[in-house]
Image (cartoon, grey):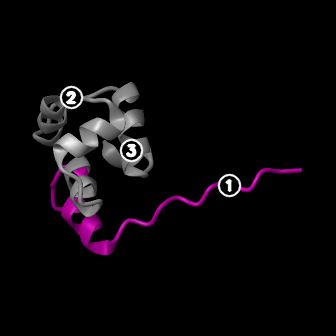
Amino acid sequence: MSEIPKAEPEIPDEAQRRIDAGEHPVRVIRELRLLTQSQLSELCGIRPNHISAIERGQTFGLKTARRLSEALNVPASLLF
């Protein structure tokens, strides 16, 4: 029996426009989810100052992307 693929969460058009315009995807999705950096930090176990740095453009690895994507309920590929 084949597995049914999970549906990817929909990203609202406004959020996608903000990302396309150059805003950092982590910030856009975090704000869409109505989370502060501290609340996101508690969900994913990444320090708030690291989340802040990521939102300002600091690079991050796959492990961090996975943790953020799970907390924000988006594919990790959206965050890069």
Task: Give whichever of discs 2 and 1 has the lower sequence position.
Answer: 1
Q: In the rendered structure, which amino acid carries the disc numbered 1?
A: Pro
Between the residue at mark 3 and the residue at mark 2, the CA separation in whole angstroms equals: 13 Å
Task: Check disc 1 and report the residue beneath it.
Answer: 5
Q: In the rendered structure, which amino acid carries the disc numbered 3?
A: Ala
Residue 43, quarter of picture: top left
Principal SS element in the magenta part? Answer: loop
4 falls in the magenta region: yes
Between the residue at mark 3 and the residue at mark 1, the CA separation in whole angstroms equals: 20 Å
Spot the residue most to the bottom.
13
> Looking at the picture, does residue 61 appear above or below residue 71?
above
Q: Which residues are magenta?
A: 1-25
Secondary element type, mark 3 = helix
Residue 80, quarter of picture: top left
Task: Check disc 3 and report the residue beneath it.
Answer: 71
Question: As drawn, is 22 to the left or to the right of 42?
Answer: left
Residue for point 25% across, 47% down:
26
Residue for point 28% across, 56% down:
29
User: What is the x, y in percent for residue 68?
Assistant: 35, 39
Question: As drawn, is 11 to the left or to the right of 48?
Answer: right
Secondary element type, mark 1 = loop
User: What is the x, y in percent for residue 53?
Assistant: 12, 33
> Looking at the picture, does residue 28 appear above or below residue 37?
below
Secondary element type, mark 2 = loop
Residue for point 21% across, 58% down:
31
Q: In the rendered structure, which amino acid carries the disc numbered 2?
A: Arg
User: What is the x, y in percent for residue 49?
Assistant: 12, 31
- Badge 2 density bin: few <14, some 14–19, many ≥20, Cα 10 Å: few
Task: Give whichever of discs 3 and 1 has the lower sequence position.
Answer: 1
Task: Check disc 2 and report the residue beneath it.
Answer: 47
Between the residue at mark 2 and the residue at mark 1, the CA separation in whole angstroms equals: 32 Å
